[in-house]
Amino acid sequence: MHYNFYPIFRVFIVALGLSLLATVSYGQRFAAIGDYGFAGPAERDVANLVKSWNPDFIITLGDNNYDFGDSTTIDQNIGQYYHAYIYKYRGRYGPSASTNRFFPSLGNHDYYTRNGEAYRDYFTLPGNGRYYDFVRGDVHFFALDSDPAEPDGISATSVQAQWLQAELAASTAHWKVVYFHHAPYSSGQHGNTVALQWPFRAWGASVVLTGHDHIYERLLVDGFPYIINGLGGRSIHQRSPKPLPESQRVFNSDYGAMLLTATPDSLAMQFFTRKQVLVETYVLHRTISTSPQLYTASPNPFLGFTRLEYSLPSPTQVQLRVLNMLGQEVAQLHQGLMPAGWHRLEWQRNGLAPGLYYVQLLGPGFSQVTRVVAL
């Protein structure tokens, strides 16, 4: 069964020799699994659930290879179920992915044999392989190593934390997802990991995803979301009879996984059981400015195309047009009533001459301009 929550609609417009691809909703669909790497019926069921969604890629929240993180078990615990997502896969269960679609994070069980050597040898990952970042569409991902054995530390002042703070500050992505294994806050049997209670919100993160406790739990700590997703296949933990005050939802009745869908204006996070029962949907929304806003084009400068984005606090008649350096209109990209919300356009360059241009968002009582360079 496939869950298509955010279909993509396209409208083609031709204006003054320029073609415009107007996309109402972009989306990245990805899965998150945690504490999953234990070959057997539970992991198989969760893997089948995840693959039924046909996600763009998968992230993991640690404990990829039970029980001891050894090279003799890693392929049967991971490759058996997820080899089609793993780049440069060299195991015995099937072909490799042509590009990386599997982005794990280290768990304590992965460290038990030679400090995670089997994990580092098995995967081809960005950065140093222990903690790293990557961007997919509207989302910037930050995978951390939360194990105390991490050489660059796990305190809020560690080298690893300083790296995260700097990268979050530099990111221009709409959503910034931080994920790792040990939960900073938990109503499960492991409880809080105080060392990992970093100021994620102040640093610019959108959400923190973790595992370690084999439950599903969503917490709001001073309004910031933490989600524990540790029901990937190993076992199920008991929940505390008295959840933390910050706990909003706790579930531990079956194994399952998360399906997440990101668009420019929302990040939807859903937890399903292996029987495809929806346990919870939680959606983050970007705040829309109280006045119309036109944002910087990306990429810029551009060759073939660039993306333009603007937001409207209420339904408004707008024009979106392109001006040359003399202020002359060379293309009209849109004219008419637009609803409130986020709007995104993918503008194909076609025969536009190289040079500096101005994109103008014009409406009753406002004008917003951004510069665009065609190469």
Image: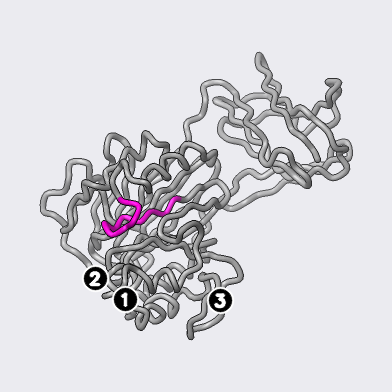
In this rendering, would 275 be left or right of 123? left
Q: Are marks 1 and 2 in contact (CB under 8 Å)?
A: yes
Residue 96 tag number? 3
Q: Secondary structure at mark 3?
A: loop
Circle 1: residue type = Phe
The magenta segment? 142-153
Residue at 86% over, 23% down? 328
Number of numbered callouts drawn: 3
Upstream in sequence: badge 3 or badge 1: 1
| Magenta stretch prevailing secondary structure | loop
Question: From where the camera sits, is residue 159 visible?
Answer: yes
Vertical order, 260 against 225 (above or below): below
Vertical order, 197 against 84 (above or below): above
Residue at 61% over, 70% down? 98
The extreme bottom residue here reads 92
Residue at 48% over, 52% down? 133
Vertical order, 238 against 342 (above or below): below
Residue 235 tag number? 2
Circle 2: residue type = Ser
Upstream in sequence: badge 2 or badge 3: 3
In this rendering, would 72 be left or right of 18? left
Residue 213 tag number? none
In this rendering, would 284 be left or right of 108? right
Residue of label 1: 38
Residue at 68% over, 19% down? 367
Circle 3: residue type = Ser
Percent of width and height locating residue 365: 66, 14
In depth, the one of 339 and 125 nearer the eye is: 125
Q: Secondary structure at mark 1?
A: loop
User: Which corner quadrant of the image does residue 172 belong to?
Assistant: top right
Q: Are marks 3 and 1 in contact (CB under 8 Å)?
A: no
Task: Give the Cα distance between marks 2 and 3.
Answer: 28 Å
